[in-house]
Every structure is written in C-alpha cells, then in structure tokens.
Image (spheres, grey):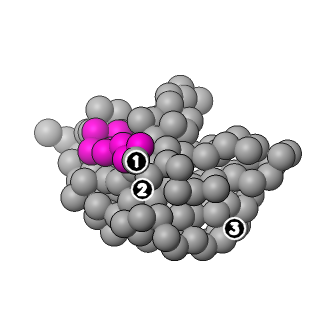
Amino acid sequence: MALECKVFRDVSTFETRGGLPYRVGITSETAGSTGISMHEVTIPPGGRARAHRHGGHESVLYVVSGEAEMWWGERLENCMKVGPGDLIYVPPGCPHVSVNRSATAAIVGVVARTEPTADETVVLMPELDSLVP
C-alpha cells in the first residue's frame, strides 16, 4: 500500500456517546489510522458532557476557545478550570465531565486519543452525572 497524507475539510458533525458534538476528524474509518484519532469538539453555551471514561485509551485535549470546568476522578471529586491554549491529559479509564458555564460562548477544542475509532471505547457512567453541579 502506498503511503498517503490526507486532509479533511468541511466534514460532518455527529453526537458522541458522551453527549457532545464532534466534527468528524481522523479515524481508522476516515484516514486509515491504526493508533490515533483526532476530532474537533464543541460544548455549546450551558452544555456539558455526560460522565464517561475511555477504556484503555489516553486522551489529550487542546482548548481553542472558551472556558470550561473539567471534573475528573473516581467520584468526579476534582475540578480544574481550563481555557484557550491549555492542554489537558486524561489517563486511560479516568472518569471525567466537561462543563460550559457560559450562557453565551461555546467552547471549541481538539481532542486526540490513542483509539483509532471515533467513539468506540466510551463507557458512560450515569451514576456519576448528578455529582457535578
């Protein structure tokens, strides 16, 4: 198979199991990647993800615009505020939730995982959703 670099523009959007809209990006399905995926995520004003974890895969997020709260830990007991230019590392299996407290501004970020599919290893944790105010 010949090596081929690819660029993706004007791609569609889908809602992840975590409840957030992703712009389709680099996956095994779109690019033939075997160990990584990358997407653009938007958290609308007042929006939030569902409590979830990624089984066995590391995640890295880069905040392009907006400010969010990121809750994480076995009982979502930790909270950090993140904003433009921040890079966030989420270890494999770590429960987390991102929340946009703004009533007017969306949060835009780029997420990459060591999972070549778009959303396959997301494990929802509804028992934790009520722990984040």
Residue drawn 29% across the image and 64% down it: 92
Could you tell whether 44 is left or right of 128 in the image? right
Residue drawn 80% across the image and 52% down it: 102
Number of the front mark, 2 or 1 = 1
Q: Nearer the viewer, residue 78 or 44?
A: 78
Q: List the residue tagged with mark 3.
A: 83
Residue 93 part of the magenta-drawn span: no
Decide if residue 62 is in sight here. no
Q: List the residue tagged with mark 2.
A: 112
Q: Are marks 2 and 1 in contact (CB under 8 Å)?
A: no
Q: Is residue 49 above or below residue 93?
A: above
**Please, what secondary structure does the residue beneath circle 3 have?**
loop
Indicate the position of residue 21 as horizontal and vertical percent values: 56, 36
Q: Is residue 10 above or below residue 101?
A: above
Q: Quadrant location of residue 119?
A: top left
Could you tell whether 71 is left or right of 17 in the image? right
Residue 121 part of the magenta-drawn span: yes
**Please, what secondary structure does the residue beneath circle 1 have?**
helix
Q: List the residue tagged with mark 1.
A: 127
Q: Are marks 3 and 1 in contact (CB under 8 Å)?
A: no
Number of the front mark, 3 or 1 = 1
**Please, what secondary structure does the residue beneath circle 2 have?**
strand
Q: Is residue 110 above or below residue 75?
A: above
Q: Is residue 111 above or below residue 47?
A: below
Region rendered in magenta: 119-126
* Mark 3 → mark 2, Cα distance in angstroms: 17 Å
